[in-house]
């Protein structure tokens, strides 16, 4: 008796192990394929996404359409939200404008479910083979990314096929069938969907797996709808986790995301059966089938359609209230005084975008502008402080350089992480240009803090007084250097060819000013004034250090990779 029972138990344990192994393996392939597909799409179209988002958000409706389009392309509503936060911080759009994009992003996530609902798993291995061949043999970077996308999509369907086959034995396993029936209870279904989404960090993945389960006839449409509702709630966890430790605009954008998703689910919760009836009427049917076979044939498409209609309807319902959503978010996440630590913190660098080099480079450009603003504050203030400022004024300039050094380190680290990704020739060139420009900005800060501030302290210690005539000469040089600095930062951060050319052509003017200043100083050397030699030495050192600042400005302009600028340099 014992000998007959033991093999049966061993067989049962083996079946459970095989089921779990196949399911987790299929899920791993599915998620990896999703990641590959998203990365490929982002690399192919990512460099256009910033332009699309910035230009097509004139009103809430175009904003919603833009959010849907961008999310459908880059396969991540969280990445779309991160981009939006950057634009808010840069002053390119308001929080109210961003609400429409965030709402549209939910519609964009439904594209994945619609694609997966098409039963083309039979061609999964063909897609993998074709994608791999393109990836392996293609020389052009763009074509290689397209091949990676095809292979990623094939892996998605191959993973679905494996999970589907693994679930076939569950059709006759009553405890599992009973558990899936319980998913029709709204709160239980929402809880299960939210929990799984929070674990895998992707609402699209949750919805896709629900569709896989449905393709085996293991779940009803109402249960599938409640699980999809739960996926919308669970994705809020991703948004909240991503906003931890970030700026107030990021927290507000995450708050809008949470409010929109939670309110959308609460509104539809009493109407699950009504929504199911509507979806059955508008979706393809298989009247020739019955029972589990009928569920397997009809439910996947029905769940995908319900997911789309639910998110689309919510966007239409809430789109008139974007301003109200923004006001609620601002009240829930009010501004707070900026501490010294936060002032020295990077504003735009976001690890969420590191998987998309083109978008991460754009974010580094924004941070370059931020660093440029800090260095410009130092450059504008330094000459008045050096020639007539107090010790406190000079100490304040030295403290500002500490902030510059901190943000410089953060940008260099971020660019280093971008460099580990797969970069094309253009992106590699842009990364090197940005790295050089960031180092040049830090060098300008060092010239100000180490050299010019030291000259100011020496002026105070030696009781040197700079004449009004010499002040005028120095101020003229300083004004031109500040103008060159502005243009050089713009040329790199915004890839402005005209700004780069302007800096290069300023070389003649700067040289003339330097020659005129040297002539003036030679005449002043003979003036009958106390501390004449010390004064002359300090004044000449000021001129020399302003010339060094212009040298770094010119280096930044030269770093702009443009044939038109290269002609000028030759």
Image (cartoon, rainbow, N blue to C red):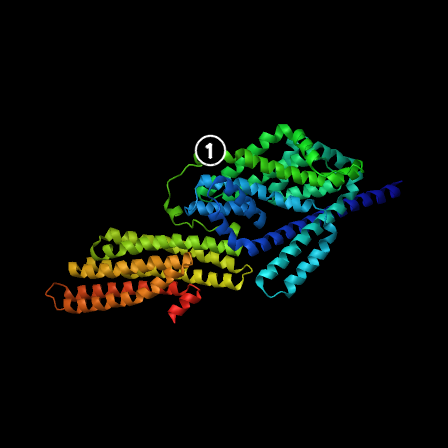
Residue 221 position in % (x across, y down):
70, 35
Judge left or right: residue 544 versus residue 127. left
Residue 170 vertical position relative to residue 426 in the rendered view, above or below: above
Residue sitting at 75 percent across and 51 percent down?
A: 122
Residue 113 appears in which quarter of the rendering? top right
* Mark 1 nearby-residue class (10 Å; few <14, some 14–19, many ≥20): few
Is 483 left, or right, of 91 in this rendering?
A: left
Give coordinates of residue 42: x percent, y percent: 56, 53
Image quadrant where one finds the N terminus: top right
Residue furthest right as drawn: 1
Q: Residue furthest left?
A: 528
Judge from the rendering whether residue 61 lies leftward or rightward of residue 284; answer left or right: left
For the residue pair 378 and 391, the one nearer the viewer reads as 378
| Residue 285 visible in this rendered orientation of the protein | yes
> Residue 313 appears in which quarter of the rendering?
top right
Pick the residue in front: 99 or 231.
Answer: 99
Find numbered disc 1 in the image and state the secondary structure of the residue it sits on: helix
Residue 410 in sight in this render? no
Residue at 21% across / 57% down in the picture?
A: 387
- Viewer-side residue, 496 vs 166: 496
Q: Which residue is mark 1?
A: 324
**Residue 307 image position (x, y, % from top left):** 63, 38
């Amino acid at each position: 008796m014992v000998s007959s029972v033991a093999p049966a138990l061993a067989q049962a344990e083996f079946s459970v192990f095989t089921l779990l192994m196949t399911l987790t393996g299929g899920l791993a392939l599915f998620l990896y394929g999703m990641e590959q597909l998203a990365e490929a799409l982002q690399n192919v179209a990512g460099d256009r996404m910033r332009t699309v988002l910035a230009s097509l958000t004139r009103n809430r409706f175009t904003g919603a359409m833009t959010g849907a389009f961008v999310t459908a392309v880059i396969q991540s509503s969280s990445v779309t939200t991160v981009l939006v936060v950057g634009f808010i911080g840069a002053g390119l759009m308001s929080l109210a404008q961003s609400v429409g994009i965030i709402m549209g992003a939910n519609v964009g996530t439904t594209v994945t479910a619609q694609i997966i609902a098409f039963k083309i798993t039979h061609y999964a291995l063909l897609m993998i083979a074709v994608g791999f061949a393109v990836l392996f043999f293609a020389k052009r970077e763009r074509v290689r990314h397209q091949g990676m996308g095809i292979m990623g999509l094939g892996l998605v369907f191959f993973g679905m096929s494996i999970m589907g086959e693994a679930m076939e034995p569950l059709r006759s396993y009553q405890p599992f069938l009973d558990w899936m029936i319980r998913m029709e209870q709204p709160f239980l279904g929402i809880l299960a969907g939210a929990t799984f989404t929070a674990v895998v960090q992707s609402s699209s993945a949750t919805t896709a797996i629900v569709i896989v389960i449905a393709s085996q006839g293991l779940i009803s449409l109402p249960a599938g709808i409640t699980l999809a509702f739960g996926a919308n709630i669970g994705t809020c966890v991703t948004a909240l986790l991503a906003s931890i430790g970030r700026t107030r605009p990021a927290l507000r954008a995450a708050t809008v995301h949470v409010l929109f998703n939670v309110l959308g689910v609460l509104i539809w919760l009493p109407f699950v059966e009504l929504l199911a009836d509507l979806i059955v009427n508008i979706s393809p049917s298989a009247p020739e089938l019955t029972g589990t076979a009928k569920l397997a044939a009809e439910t996947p498409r029905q769940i995908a359609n319900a997911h789309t209609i639910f998110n689309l309807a919510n966007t239409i319902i809430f789109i008139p209230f974007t301003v109200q959503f923004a006001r609620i978010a601002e009240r829930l996440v009010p501004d707070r005084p900026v501490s010294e630590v936060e002032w020295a913190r990077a504003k735009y660098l976001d690890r969420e975008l590191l998987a998309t080099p083109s978008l991460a480079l754009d974010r580094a450009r924004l941070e370059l502008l931020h660093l440029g603003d800090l260095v410009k504050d130092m450059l504008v203030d330094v000459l008045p402080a050096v020639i007539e400022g107090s010790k406190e004024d000079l100490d304040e300039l030295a403290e500002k350089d500490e902030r510059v050094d901190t943000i410089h380190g953060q940008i260099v680290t971020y660019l280093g992480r971008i460099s580990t990704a797969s970069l094309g020739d253009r992106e590699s060139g842009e990364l090197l240009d940005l790295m050089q420009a960031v180092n040049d900005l830090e060098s300008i800060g060092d010239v100000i803090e180490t050299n010019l501030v030291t000259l100011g302290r020496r002026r105070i210690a030696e009781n040197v007084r700079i004449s009004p005539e010499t002040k005028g000469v120095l101020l003229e040089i300083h004004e031109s250097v500040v103008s060159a600095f502005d243009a050089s930062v713009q040329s790199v951060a915004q890839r402005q060819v005209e700004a780069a050319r302007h800096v290069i052509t300023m070389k003649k003017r700067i040289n003339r000013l330097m020659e005129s200043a040297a002539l003036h100083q030679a005449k002043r050397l003979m003036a009958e004034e106390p501390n004449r030699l010390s004064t002359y030495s300090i004044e000449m050192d000021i001129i020399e250090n302003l010339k060094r600042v212009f040298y770094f400005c010119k280096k930044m302009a030269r770093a702009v990779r443009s044939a038109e600028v290269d002609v000028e340099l030759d």
